[in-house]
Amino acid sequence: MDFYDVINNRRTIRDFVDEDIPKDALERIIDAAFKAPTNDHLRDWEYIIINDKETLKKALKTVPKGITNEELEELFVNWNLNDKLQQECYRNAVPKQYRMFLDANLVIIPLLKEKVDILHPENLSHLNGFASIWCSIENLLLAATFEGYGCSLRIPLNDEDLILKQELNIPDGYFIPCILGIGKEDTSKPRNKQKEIDIKSRIHYNKF
Ligand SMILES: Cc1cc2nc3c(=O)[nH]c(=O)nc-3n(C[C@H](O)[C@H](O)[C@H](O)COP(=O)(O)O)c2cc1C
């Protein structure tokens, strides 16, 4: 796969088949994550790999297991989701928020050492650590694609990060930017359509 094939093939995958990821491939993927740019040169990141389903079930016990159609319609209104393609994506994604981790071969929890209060930044540079770990996560997503795997992704809501920290013995002072599932895609399930963007209309030379 050349670089642009990797970019074009990376998708958020929420349906997996049961297939193990070899440890050497996993370590190459995590190694790629540690090659991302970083604000302070330190790469104060940790990656927890969960391969035990019982641990996983405890760690994700408050992630919603499903959603009714009425709740989904309410969510569209509350979150202001008006675009048809976007609604289609959420219709597919929201009911899978728990299963997409249980069915993944492994779950990965990125951790960032929190040096400033990320949820109450005083200026943009207070978000540099947060931005850096997302660069790391993107490297991971691309490396996983290159290795032939797909990833699901969720932002922990409500008490989900607290439960993860308790169940996984995460020391104080770490921030969880997202939960990742990684595994072999179930290609019999349809992928969400990506929104097509007219790139020429989004590039602005000299002035907006
Ligand atoms: C910051 C961020 C937060 C996201 N949160 C979730 C999430 O909570 N649950 C989920 O299933 N997908 C989540 N996604 C994945 C998006 O739904 C997905 O990237 C988007 O629909 C585009 O699809 P694609 O990744 O297949 O191109 C998130 C992605 C990003 C970058």
Image (spheres, grey):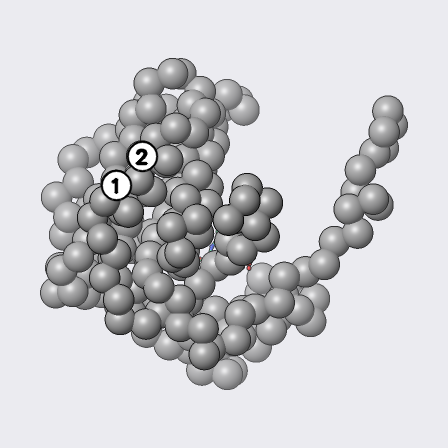
Q: Nearer the viewer, residue 42 or 71?
A: 42
Count of numbered tags: 2
Corner quadrant of residue 100: bottom left
- Tell me residue 174's x, y (percent): 26, 34
Q: Is residue 151 visible?
A: no
186 with respect to 173 (left or right): right
Q: Residue at x 33, y 57 (%)?
A: 182
190 with respect to 16 (left or right): right
Question: To which residue does mark 1 refer?
Answer: 27
138 over 82 or under it: above or below: above
Q: Is mark 2 on a helix, strand or loop?
A: helix
Corner quadrant of residue 32: top left
Q: Nearer the viewer, residue 154 or 197?
A: 197
204 with respect to 75 (left or right): right
Q: Residues within 10 Å of mark 1 (few under 14, many from 20)?
A: few
Disc assigned to residue 31: 2
Tag 1 and tag 2, C-beta contact below 8 Å: yes
- Which residue is situated farthest in the front direction here? 1
Disc assigned to residue 125: none
Q: Can residue 194 be seen in this view?
A: yes
What kind of residue is marked 1? Glu
Q: Which residue is drawn at 69% across and 71% down?
A: 84
